[in-house]
Amino acid sequence: MLKRTLYFLQPSFLSSFDVKDWKGIAIKPAFIVLLFSLGMWMIPIPQGLDPKAWNLFIIFAATILGVVLKPLPLASWTLLSLCVCLLTNTLTTAQALSSFGKGVVWLVVFAFFISRGFIKTGLGARLAYTFVKIFGRSTLGLSYGLVFTDVLLAPTIPSNTARLGGILFPILSSLSDEYGSTPAKKTSRKIGAFLLVTIFQVDMVACAMFLTAIASNPLAVSIASSFGIELTWIGWLKASCVPGVLTILIIPTLLYYVFPPELKKTPDAPKIALQKLTQMGKLSLPEIVMLCTFALLVCLWISGAAIGISASTTALLGIVILLVTGVLQFDDLLAEKGAWTTLIWFAILLTLAYNMADLGFMKWLGAHIQSFVQPFPVWTAVAVISIGFFFAHYFFASSTAHISSMYAMFLLALLGVGAPPLFSALVLSFASSLSSGLTHYGTGAAPIYFGANYVSVKDWCKLGLICGLVSLVIWGTVGMAWWYAIGLLD
């Protein structure tokens, strides 16, 4: 049974489900989820577990399997799951809709709207070309210029798909074309493949560094809060900054040697960037407003807790400023489909996770995981649990699926063996983002970059594993030393 399950989760098997077979439904994935659900319903309710908790777990497990296999678009699939919860009386209407009013859900939605400002005003592209002009005389410097752009944008764009796909990928493609490095000419290794892999892998680190860099991070924050663990924006950054910055500085140079570009010097890149900047002209008024709003948001996210302004309120303030000044129109918000889609699936996954915790399922499952690692010394158990959580991302097509299905139970296991609560919540959150680069399907931006055909599956997975292991070593050594220094391990 395990062997068959692992086969179904292989990338080659999953890729066969891209075509919608009937009125928007992929029949094979839907059939697999249906068989899985029926099989789970026939299993007797485990002893000591509330029947509603077991029923909700079955719905939740089927939902996560659907997130991976994609029988329907994500928002449609989660709405179906919510409907099943109501029809089976597993949840009341109030319980089913409870998470739509949570601040963390709207924080993500508001941040999507703010990211639209970067794209609409052209400020994101201007920042990228500015870094290329400064650092772009060599291929390695060019990679650092694009990387710094991504890291700078990460705090206010909660979608690595938007950052990597909407802002950086067009610039990367343009630079690669300028140097004749394209898959069509079989010259990907000249410069394009190196830049693409480097930007993608470093973005996983940027996602780990900032609470608002990817939608799955606020999901982890919300789940952690149900255990009485409060994660703040500045607290997150304080824990991640040292290992994060070190990893960001190391990975481009590491890839430069293990996956070297054929072209080492790019003296024309600054000229190309300057030409693009000249075409864009001076900073426009909308860009200036966007830049000032960005600075204000970061300042308030850092100091907001001390002055009583929540992260979601800060994001809303940013949107209001952009609307009042005319940088964004309300139609821009309505057209931001990613935000509204995220509102639906994010709130529903949060609803399922919260109610499973309320019904006692997470506590029951965490106790079983805890009993497995109990014989180990505390920090050995912590390492086993954390590394296991990290490499489990091979079985998930998104950080959201990884967090929503495994975060709570692994957090309970860490708490059960005696790990500090704040450390436990953060280390699992970091691991989910850092492990997203292991495969070519592990996060939303991966299909865009892998689908450009610059890098083979073999090279992608090999480089993903190398970068993943390097991240594990840095965050497990330098990170641990830093966390001890700031009192996170007390």
Image (cartoon, grey):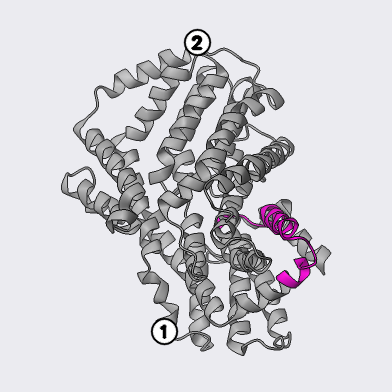
Asked if the residue under mark 1 is in contact with the one under mark 2, i.e. CB atoms within 8 Å, the reply is no
Is residue 21 visible to the viewer in this orientation of the structure?
no
Residue 123: x and y, percent?
Answer: 32, 33
Q: Is residue 44 above or below residue 381?
A: below
Residue 299: x and y, percent?
Answer: 31, 44
204 within the magenta span: no
Q: Which residue was labeled with disc 2?
A: 267
Q: Is residue 65 above or below residue 392?
A: below
Q: Residue at x 63, y 35 (%)?
A: 453
Looking at the rendering, which quadrant does residue 254 occupy? top right
Q: Element type at marker 1?
A: helix
379 within the magenta span: yes
Is residue 94 visible to the viewer in this orientation of the structure?
yes
Q: Nearer the viewer, residue 344 or 140?
A: 140
Which quadrant: the C terminus? bottom right
The stretch in magenta equals: 370-399
Residue 269: x and y, percent?
Answer: 47, 16
Residue type, numbered disc 2: Pro
Q: Which residue was labeled with disc 1?
A: 93
